[in-house]
Image (tube, grey):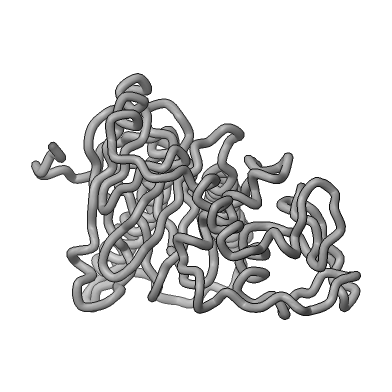
């Protein structure tokens, strides 16, 4: 069970947590030191220059370049250290390592829905293995949410009509709080869950013992055929009325208006829902919209299938 006892700071349970805390404590130390210095100087000058004190109050005309240099250089050095440290941490947290487990996350009022690549589905509960990077591919079905796991020191907005992502690698087994950190409506405070970190062997046993649906790739393939997408997007190098989809994910696509765009997850989603927005060069804008026919889960399945057709299917960006 989740430890409900009082803790000044959440437990450090991911690889990035100690790095985030180190930067946080550095910022606290710098701000606290400056605050203490200013407070001491205020008290000192208030006592020294009180109304009845006999002190030299004449205005001094000479410039003290040492002091002026110090109050410019020292803050500059401190802020540049903060910037470099924070930028390094940000880029590290934004780039999931190769081989990360990719789990789909759908936020809606007021619950979290998770689907594992093996097909296992969960609501308000996420099982992950210890010592293995996990990447969450997230989208909202309604309003802006924000997935937050304090023990992992990770938080990211979950937006409608756009994929976002975050990754983590748990270092300790146990159960940890999961919250929505963005006010999303009347039941926002109840939009919470837990992350259960298991040993790798226990995680595999959980995958095999749970109630699993179709893996996203297989569900996407079936939906692809059900919607008759294969009548225009033919495989095996056959010409069709639509562009070929093999190896399209992660590639540069030339459009009819002369632009070139990257075929990432957002591009694939937009091409399914709003195919007229970016028409591929050499093809007619005849594809119908599936906006009213496919929900967010179906879109995730279709994109998982299209990614599986590419040699870069495992290369994703958050």
Q: Is 167 drawn above or below residue 190 in the view shown?
A: above
Q: Residue at x 59, y 60 (%)?
A: 72
Q: Residue at x 81, y 62 (%)?
A: 243
Quick check: can you spot residue 67?
no
Q: Residue at x 27, y 56 (%)?
A: 179
Q: Quadrant of residue 200?
A: top left
Q: Please, which residue is most extreme toward the left here?
A: 5
Nearer to us in this view, 147 or 80: 147
Q: Residue at x 34, y 47 (%)?
A: 121
Task: Name the spot of residue 56 as percent of width and height, x first.
Answer: 39, 71
Task: Name the spot of residue 236 as percent of width and height, x first.
Answer: 80, 46
Q: How many marks?
A: 0
Quick check: can you spot residue 6?
yes
Nearer to us in this view, 204 or 289: 289
> Where's the N terminus, which quadrant?
top left
Task: Name the spot of residue 293 as percent of width and height, x first.
Answer: 50, 74
Q: Quadrant of residue 15?
A: top left
Nearer to us in this view, 105 or 241: 241
| Left or right side of 154 for 245 | right
Nearer to us in this view, 253 or 215: 215
Task: Name the spot of residue 184 as percent of width and height, x first.
Answer: 30, 74
């Amino acid at each position: 069970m989740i430890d409900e006892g009082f803790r000044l700071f959440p437990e450090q349970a991911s690889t990035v947590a100690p790095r985030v805390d180190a930067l946080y404590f550095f910022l606290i130390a710098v701000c606290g030191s400056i605050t203490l210095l200013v407070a001491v100087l205020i008290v000192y000058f208030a006592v020294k220059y009180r109304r009845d004190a006999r002190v030299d109050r004449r205005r001094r005309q000479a410039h003290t370049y040492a002091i002026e240099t110090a109050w410019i250089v020292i803050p500059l050095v401190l802020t540049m250290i903060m910037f470099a440290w924070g930028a390094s941490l940000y880029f590290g947290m934004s780039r999931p390592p190769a081989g990360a487990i990719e789990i789909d996350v759908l936020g809606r009022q007021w619950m979290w829905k998770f689907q594992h690549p093996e097909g296992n589905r969960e609501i308000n509960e996420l099982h992950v293995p210890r010592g293995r990077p996990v990447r969450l591919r997230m989208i909202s079905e309604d309003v802006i949410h924000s997935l937050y796991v304090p023990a992992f020191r990770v938080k990211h907005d979950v937006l409608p009509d756009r994929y976002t992502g975050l990754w983590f690698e748990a270092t300790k087994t146990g159960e940890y709080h999961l919250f929505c950190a963005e006010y999303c409506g009347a039941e926002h405070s109840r939009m919470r869950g837990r992350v259960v970190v298991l040993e790798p062997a226990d995680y595999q046993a959980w995958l095999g013992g749970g109630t699993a649906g179709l893996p996203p790739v297989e569900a996407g393939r079936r939906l692809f055929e059900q919607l008759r997408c294969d009548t225009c997007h033919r495989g095996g190098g056959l010409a069709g009325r639509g562009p070929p989809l093999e190896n399209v994910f992660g590639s540069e696509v030339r459009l009819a208006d002369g632009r070139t765009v990257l075929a990432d997850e957002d591009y694939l989603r937009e091409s399914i829902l709003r195919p007229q927005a970016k028409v591929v060069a050499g093809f007619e804008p005849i594809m119908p919209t599936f906006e009213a026919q496919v929900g967010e889960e179906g879109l995730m399945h279709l994109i998982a299938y299209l990614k599986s057709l590419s040699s870069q299917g495992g290369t994703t960006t958050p």
